[in-house]
Amino acid sequence: MEISFTDRELDVMAVLWDRGSATVAEVREALTDTLAYTTVLTILRILHDKGYVRHEEEGRAHRYYPRVERQAAGESALRRLTKKLFKGSPELLLTQLVSDRGLSDDEMRRMRELLDERLGEGAP
């Protein structure tokens, strides 16, 4: 299943993933930029219609819960990014990542460790 978010939807989902659940007011409060209550409500309704969140009544408000895991959304976004920007080549994506001069030596070592671990999984 391909999971796709707009930037605003992703901002709202990040709040839900971080908190586990939130009301419209709580999402609005947690966002770094100020959005109208009705805008946040509209985004949550769209996410609900797409099947990415569910809600339960909580007094006069609704509490929203993510139905999609952050990791699943990340994997889907990465597949889409790899396909569209890197001609479907994970190698080109990795080349771009390791060419980034902003990576620390520790980050580069950790990437190498992850690759070594993955390579070791396929060994007899």
Image (spheres, helix red, strand yellow):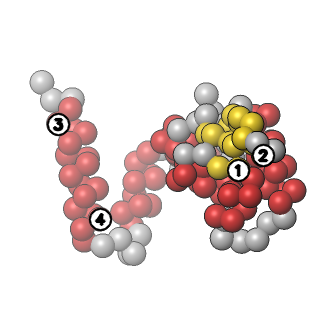
Q: Nearer the viewer, mark 1 or mark 4?
A: 1
Q: Is residue 58 above or below residue 22?
A: above
Q: Which residue is mark 3?
A: 120
Mark 2, Cα crowd under 10 Å, few <14 / some 14-19 / many 20+, is: few
Tell me the distance, in whole angstroms, between the alpha carbons under discs 3 and 2. 50 Å
Mark 3, Cα crowd under 10 Å, few <14 / some 14-19 / many 20+, is: few
Tell me the distance, in whole angstroms, between the alpha carbons under discs 3 and 1. 45 Å
Tell me the distance, in whole angstroms, between the alpha carbons under discs 4 and 3. 20 Å
Q: Which residue is mark 4?
A: 107
Q: Which residue is mark 2?
A: 61
Task: Give the residue at the far front of this rendering.
Answer: 59
Task: Give the residue at the far top of this rendering.
Answer: 124
Residue pictured at 17% horizontal, 36% vertical: 120
Element assignment for label 1: strand
Tell me the distance, in whole angstroms, between the alpha carbons under discs 2 and 4. 43 Å
Q: Nearer the viewer, mark 4 or mark 3?
A: 4
